[in-house]
Image: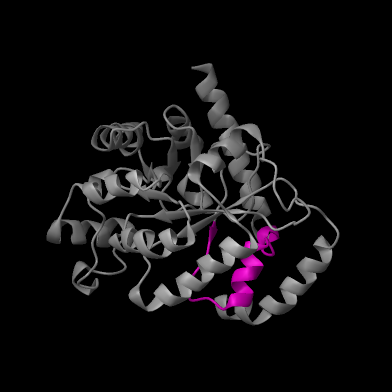
């Protein structure tokens, strides 16, 4: 399926651009979703970030938060319909720390990093085993992970903060929230927030639920998230604005190794229509969760 989309990307992008012809920017931004960045993908990642910064522009996490809560700021090139982008990274791999200090710094980009504090507290083989079980759901064993695979340390996360990046919560142990009982939801969300606040001397504002798909979240889980966090990011493609849901922020997963025409198609929202039903479903869940939270 991915290969077919790559092949069709130029034609799909052309059709999408024709549909947008003459339409101004609609006051929305996109969140981009990355995970581990391998050494093989560094050059491609650098090119992608350079393209995004030049053609779309980037937002800091602070700017994205303000946009969601108060609407878009004035843009120098307001006639452009290309949405600016917030860069986000899931799981907290050490490669994120490396690209933040090299590639992101080079392009002047500040990003949002989602980490699992319970996994951060582990080290060595215990951490590798937990990553294989929780992040990869046992599809790969700890012995098959590259030797360099590790998660960022608390000191590295603190340094990212000092450099102007933001650290969000990705759950205590990267568990699928829709499968958890209330006591486990509290640990995965509230206890995780407490730990992050203590270790990083912050009030953690963002949550991104593990796996990001519509089947990994429900009203009960989103209600707990809403009781502690200002925003929750999903993994569903789409754009975001002040008219959206604070607990249903969309994000586009994008591979640095994908062909550039396909990357451009994603950045321009050319595949958003494929996820419209799932976004509506998430919006309903968010509305119910916020209503319940407000009533308690």
Determine whether 276 is above or below 148 in the image. above
Q: Nearer the viewer, residue 136 or 86?
A: 86
Determine whether 14 is above or below 183 in the image. below
Residue at figure coordinates x 50%, y 23% from the top left: 293
Q: Quadrant of the N terminus?
A: bottom right
Residue at figure coordinates x 37%, y 78% from the top left: 40
- Image coordinates of residue 183 in percent, x first then y, are 30, 32
Q: Is residue 17 magenta?
A: no
Determine whether 132 is above or below 115 in the image. below
- Image coordinates of residue 272 in percent, x first then y, are 67, 58
Residue at figure coordinates x 66%, y 51% from the top left: 277
Residue furthest to the top? 296
Residue furthest to the right? 22
* 172 with respect to 270 (left or right): left
Which range of residues does the magenta coloring cover?
Answer: 252-273
User: Is residue 205 visible to the viewer in this orientation of the structure?
Assistant: yes
* 71 with respect to 25 (left or right): left
Q: Nearer the viewer, residue 13 or 181?
A: 13
- Image coordinates of residue 158 in percent, x first then y, are 28, 44
- Image coordinates of residue 259 in percent, x first then y, are 57, 78
Q: How is the image coloured?
A: one colour
User: Is residue 245 visible to the viewer in this orientation of the structure?
Assistant: no
Q: Nearer the viewer, residue 62 or 295?
A: 62
Residue at figure coordinates x 55%, y 28% from the top left: 290
Q: How many marks?
A: 0
* 216 with respect to 158 (left or right): right
Choose top left, top right, bottom left or bottom right for residue 275. Answer: bottom right
Q: Is residue 258 magenta?
A: yes
């Amino acid at each position: 399926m991915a290969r077919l989309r790559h092949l069709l990307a130029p034609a799909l992008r052309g059709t999408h651009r024709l549909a947008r012809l003459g339409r101004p920017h609609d006051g929305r931004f996109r969140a981009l979703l990355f995970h581990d960045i391998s050494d093989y993908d560094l050059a491609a990642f650098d090119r992608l970030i350079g393209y995004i910064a030049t053609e779309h522009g980037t937002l800091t996490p602070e700017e994205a938060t303000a946009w969601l809560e108060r609407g878009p700021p004035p843009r120098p090139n307001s006639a452009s319909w290309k949405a600016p982008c917030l860069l986000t990274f899931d799981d907290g791999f050490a490669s994120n720390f490396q690209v933040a200090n090299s590639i992101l710094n080079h392009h002047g980009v500040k990003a949002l990093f989602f980490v699992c504090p319970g996994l951060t507290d582990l080290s060595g083989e215990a951490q590798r085993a937990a990553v294989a079980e929780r992040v990869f759901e046992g599809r790969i064993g700890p012995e098959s992970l590259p030797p360099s695979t590790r998660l960022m340390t608390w000191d590295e996360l603190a340094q990212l903060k000092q450099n102007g990046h933001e650290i969000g919560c990705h759950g205590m142990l990267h568990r699928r929230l829709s499968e958890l009982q209330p006591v486990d939801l509290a640990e995965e969300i509230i206890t995780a927030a407490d730990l992050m606040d203590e270790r990083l001397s912050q009030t953690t504002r963002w949550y991104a639920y593990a796996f990001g798909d519509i089947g990994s979240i429900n009203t009960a889980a989103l209600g707990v998230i809403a009781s502690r966090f200002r925003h929750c990011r999903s993994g569903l493609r789409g754009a975001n604005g002040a008219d959206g849901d604070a607990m249903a922020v969309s994000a586009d997963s994008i591979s640095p190794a994908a062909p550039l025409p396909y990357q451009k198609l994603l950045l321009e929202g050319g595949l958003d229509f494929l996820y419209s039903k799932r976004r509506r479903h998430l919006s309903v869940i968010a509305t119910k969760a916020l209503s319940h939270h407000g009533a308690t």
